[in-house]
Amino acid sequence: MTSSAIFGMIAAPLAVLGVGKIDRRKVLLTLTFILIVANILSTISTNFILFLVARIILGIAVGGFWAVSIAASNRLVPMEKAARASSCF
């Protein structure tokens, strides 16, 4: 669990900087696909090392997804609804 959090914390700011001019929708879809693959990989892992690698990939994808989605949400809604778009509710 800690490895996911650490790698997510590192990946979040790097994802925002690394995205650049790439379409945010494509980035979010790619990160969602990586999340699915990492979850499947952790489900079928047969040893601890494979499980740990899957959780690290999951942390990177989650950190990147949240960072990019918060930034993208402000562009997808009118200005008066930007705060609600980036909240959990």
Image: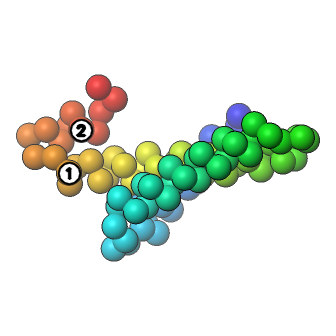
Q: Position of residue 88 (x, y in %)?
A: 34, 29
Find the residue positioned furthest to the bottom. Answer: 21
Residue named by callout 2: 85
* Residue drawn where x is 65% and y is 49% of the image: 37
Q: Position of residue 29 (x, y in %)?
A: 44, 55
Q: Of helix, strand and loop, which one carries label 2?
A: helix
* Residue drawn where x is 31% and y is 53% of the image: 71
Q: Position of residue 51 (x, y in %)?
A: 80, 42
Q: Residues within 10 Å of mark 2 (few under 14, many from 20)?
A: some
Residues under numbered marks 2 and 1 in contact, where contact means CB atoms less than 8 Å apart: yes
> Mark 2 is on which residue type?
Ala
Q: Of helix, strand and loop, which one carries label 1?
A: helix
Q: Position of residue 75 (x, y in %)?
A: 20, 54
Answer above or below: position of 86 versus 20. Answer: above
Which circle marks residue 76 in the picture?
1
Query: For the residues marked 2 and 1, what is the alpha-carbon distance in whole angstroms?
Result: 9 Å
Q: Residues within 10 Å of mark 1 (few under 14, many from 20)?
A: few
* Residue drawn where x is 43% and y is 61% of the image: 27
> Mark 1 is on which residue type?
Leu
